[in-house]
Image (tube, rainbow, N blue to C red):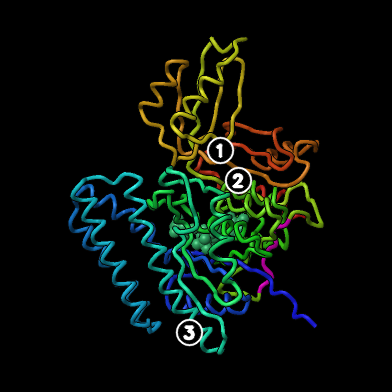
Amino acid sequence: MMAPMKKLVVSKFGGTSMNDAKTMALCAQVAHQKQSSVVVVSATSGTTNQLLELGLACVQGDNEKIKSLISTIESRHKKIASDLGLSSSRLAILDQLLQELQSLAQGIQLLKDNSARNSDALVSLGERLSSVLFTEALTQKYLNEKSPLIVELLDARKLIKTDHHFGRARPKLSEIEKLCEANLKPRLGSTVFVTQGFIGSTIENQTTTLGRGGSDFSAALFAEGLGADTLEIWTDVAGIATTDPRICKTARMLSEISFTEASELATFGAKVLHPATLMPAQRKNIPVFVGSSFNPEQAGTWVKKSVDSSPLVRALALRKNQSLVTLTTPQMWQSSGFLFQIFQVFHDHKISVDAVTTSEISVAMTLDSTETLSTEVIQKLSEFAEVQVEKNLSLISLIGNNINHTAGLAEKAFSSLPGVNIRMICQGASRHNFCFLVSDSVSQEVIQNLHHQFIDSQ
Ligand code: ADP
Ligand code: ASP
Ligand code: MG
């Protein structure tokens, strides 16, 4: 009788899971138990932020800060290496990477050039360092279990090919698939790969990154490229909850959620998944499991194409630090092409717009605060209309099913928010999302009230 085919599992462990030698060992146990073939890891928690800070300190020539950041990063990783008992060959790789960190910082300082391209090269070191350490942790696990499988460190940049949009590069899907097919797939029977999330490279091998929180996306790209059976996202919470458990004490874990709902949830602020993660999974119909690397036995959440229930409101999302840009001009009245002109400006400057509403002579749209509304952009927009920018706003989203065809939803939502100024409402385009803007200062309370109104009572 033929042995049953082993399921192909790609798993990803986030920053908090990569915190120290102890958490790395826990993750290694999970990866081994789940028989993951490709393990994608984030940088150790907080390191990406420190590397970004380092880039800034380098252009500012702040020598003290540069020294202290480099030494913090160095000692943190060396301590984990020593706690894990890193092999001499991996120690040599780690030292080389730490040397590269010094050189890149020096280069950025000398050239006073912390461009997105240089910054990507610098921040890539976060994942490159953690993955060396995790390879050790996983190797030890496999050796202890006397497994015939070999654990190998893989440079994700060889497979995750992207465009040249440094800082938020877009993957070249067919390229990635071809490379995974040719270089990884034939070796999966004998090798377990540990690789980096978040990073990729251009066709000319310049290092790129996929945007903050992008390791989930990397794992999904590997899963798609390999046609995996399951993608597992291991993080610091036991799944996707009805809302961020840090905001609402009564938030509860969902056992399942559809691809569409989870994509809306991630796009509209739930940090638990990078917004682009579910697209590759959806394209290949790969079920995604989200669970806690600290409590892997807890049930977790399955994200799938079809799910058993379709509640009106499944979850709530909060996206803070939004800007509302309102453009007003009488010329818009009964004219054509006005919206085209405006969106051309955003397109030219690679600015992503989230929610949009229009009236007869004005159009309002929300942008994430990470989008740079430079004076040049504002000037360009001012050629068409009067521009008003309001900051410190939060986008609140109710995510569920049949939302745009259910009477009384808005009434139920707003009746639980007396006295809250609603700056903008977006509804109608999606069956799965109803969202509105409020001030950042009341946003958490708004989520708590809505949770009470729609979810606690279910
Ligand atoms: P990782 O480093 O593992 O990628 P993240 O910090 O990026 O982890 O994402 C996990 C965090 O997402 C949780 O600690 C939680 O606070 C937050 N989060 C926001 N919304 C949700 C939600 N609906 N369900 C679960 N976690 C959420
Ligand atoms: N290390 C990267 C970040 O902090 C990517 C990730 O963790 O997903 O944004
Ligand atoms: Mg994350």
Residue range highlighted in magenta? 298-304
Which residue: 74% across, 80% down? 3
Q: Residues within 10 Å of mark 3 (few under 14, many from 20)?
A: some
What percent of the width, then of the height, locates residue 446? 60, 45
What percent of the width, then of the height, locates residue 363? 56, 22
Do the CB atoms of the residues marked 2 and 3 lie less than 8 Å apart?
Answer: no
Which residue: 36% across, 56% down? 123
> Mark 3: which amino acid?
Gln
Q: Nearer the viewer, residue 242 or 86?
A: 86
Do the CB atoms of the residues marked 1 and 3 lie less than 8 Å apart?
Answer: no
Which residue: 51% across, 13% down? 329
Q: Is label 3 within 8 A of ligand 1 (CB to nearest ligand atom)? A: no
Please report whichever mark, 1 or 2, sits nearer to the chain's N-terminal start. Answer: 1
> Which residue is under mark 3?
140
Mark number displayed over residue 446: 2
In-image side of 283 versus 59 (left or right): right
What percent of the width, then of the height, locates residue 177? 58, 55
Q: Quadrant of residue 435?
A: top right
Please report whichever mark, 1 or 3, sits nearer to the chain's N-terminal start. Answer: 3
Residue 430 appears in view: yes
> Mark 1: which amino acid?
Val
Mark number displayed over residue 438: 1
The quadrant of the picture occupied by the C terminus is bottom right
Q: Nearer the viewer, residue 180 or 209?
A: 180
> Mark 2: which amino acid?
Val
Q: Provide the secondary structure element on which disc 3 rests.
A: helix
